[in-house]
Image (cartoon, grey):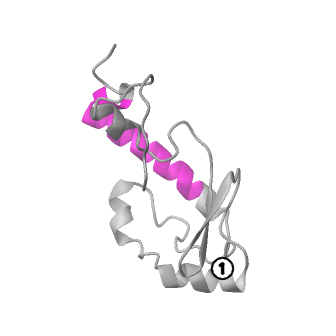
Amino acid sequence: MSDYYDRLETRSPDERRADQSKALLAQIERVMAGPDNCLVADGDVRGIEDLARLPVLRKSDLVKWQAEKPPFGGMVVSNVAHIFQSPGPIYEPGGVSHDWWRMGRGLFAAGIRADDIVQNCF
């Protein structure tokens, strides 16, 4: 059994940066194909260093957008497995992936393995 959760923990900083940049650019392409309330203009983000220049997405913006264009404010939504209703109200579509909640790494670091039973309340 490995001491590491997966290959991501043993990447070099250069490999991690390249993977992050690739994922970021793919996400930006999806966002640019989305609604006109997108806070990113074509060419604004070409790399990770550009993220600091982006405006903050505020909860009040989501409430307004979702009221104007129900149910998700015109946001790009695909492969929805569940929807959370947050105070506001804000409707948050959720998908499915290997580690959707991104808690696997932390649970693994705490010593929890596949044959363990955990009650996780959050």
How many tags in the picture? Answer: 1
Q: Secondary structure at mark 1?
A: helix
Residue 11 in view, yes or no: no
Q: Residue, x 45% and y 62% (percent of image)?
A: 45
Quadrant placement of the N terminus:
top left
From what the image shows, is residue 93 above or below residue 112? Answer: below
Please name the residue shown 29% across and 36% down the image. Answer: 14
| The image quarter in which residue 96 lies | top right
Residue denoted by label 1:
66
Image quadrant where one finds the C terminus: bottom left
- Residue 63 on image: x %, y %: 58, 82
Q: Position of residue 48 (x, y in %)?
A: 37, 55
Where in the figure is residue 74, as x and y percent of width and height? 69, 73
Above or below: residue 6 compared with residue 79: above
**The residue under label 1 is which amino acid type?**
Gln
Q: Viewer-proximal residue, 118 or 40?
A: 118
Magenta stretch? 8-29
- Tell me if residue 113 is in the magenta stretch: no
